[in-house]
Image (cartoon, rainbow, N blue to C red):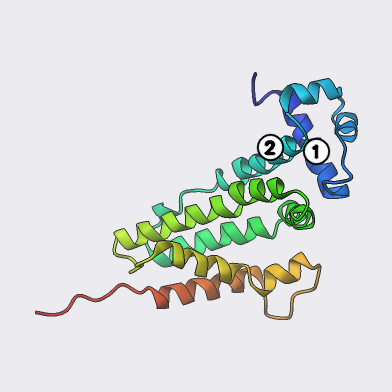
Amino acid sequence: MNKRSPKREAIIEAAQALFLEHGYGVTSMDMVAGKAGVSKATIYAHFAGKDDLFAAVIHRHRELDFDSMPPWERQPDAGTALTQAGTDLIRLILSPDVMGMHRVVVAEAPRQPELARAFWEAGPAYGKARVVALFADLDRRGLLSVPEAWAAADQFLGMLRSEVFYRTLLGLALPEGRSPQTTVANAVDTMLRAYAPRKACAG
């Protein structure tokens, strides 16, 4: 079956809109069918159940968001590469759809751990893997000295998910002087200082 069929895409778009508006628990397959303009039988021809449909929504975001980002490793220096990565990532994590899905997953995770797992694997874990690959590449090229790429990725992502992220998640206004751009700039500056390349010893 064509995974890019118009009906399948319509079902995923309808499900996403309903999950964001009503949450996972309230959204029913009848509601998805009505909004997508298809029968429930058509939905079940594409998806095994609501959890499978939710996972498809998450994977679609990964394809549209992460997979469409340009390769950060192609940048000529560490500052430019980290700035591009940070800008792409913070724009993604602060986007209304991703914020909405984050809220849905957090609310449902205690009752639906499979949803949390699907979100984690297609979202945060997938994004971290890309950041790990970036730090490994910067280390390999001698642009940074990164003994543990996964630890550096944790630090970088942690700085991106700081006050701006949590205030946006909670619907609070940002203080004067705080913005996604300043968050990225501060994170990049910290990483460049912490992982500056070791200078070769003379003689």
Q: Secondary structure at mark 1?
A: helix
The amino acid type, in three-letter code, at marker 1 is: Ala
Left or right: 70, with 196 as reference point: right
Is 94 or 41 nearer to us in this picture? 41
* Quadrant (top left/top right/bottom left/bottom right) for the N terminus: top right
| Image quarter of residue 139 | bottom left
Q: Which residue is mark 2?
A: 56
Q: Is residue 77 visible?
A: yes
Separation (CA) of disc 1 from disc 2 = 10 Å
Task: Name the residue located 35 percent from the left edge and 74 percent from the top edge.
Answer: 196
* Quadrant (top left/top right/bottom left/bottom right) for the C terminus: bottom left
Considering only order in the chain, which callout, 2 or 1, is on the residue closer to the N terminus? 1
| Image quarter of residue 182 | bottom right
The label on residue 15 is: 1
| Image quarter of residue 3 | top right
**Which residue is farthest left?**
203
**Which residue is farthest top?**
1
Measured along the vertical axis of the image, is residue 130 above or below residue 203? above
The amino acid type, in three-letter code, at marker 2 is: Ala
Task: Name the residue located 84 percent from the left edge and 30 percent from the top edge.
Answer: 36
Percent across and percent down for residue 140 are 30, 59
The label on residue 79 is: none
Measured along the vertical axis of the image, is residue 78 above or below residue 64? below
The residue carrying pointer 1 sits among few (fewer than 14), some (14 to 19) or many (20 or more) residues within 10 Å by Cα, namely many
Task: Name the residue located 48 percent from the left edge and 75 percent from the top edge.
Answer: 189
Percent across and percent down for residue 154 are 51, 66
Percent across and percent down for residue 5 are 69, 23
Task: Name the residue located 73 percent from the left edge and 30 percent from the top edge.
Answer: 9
Q: Is residue 76 visible?
A: no
Percent across and percent down for residue 99 are 74, 57
The answer to whether mark 1 and mark 2 are in CB contact below 8 A is yes
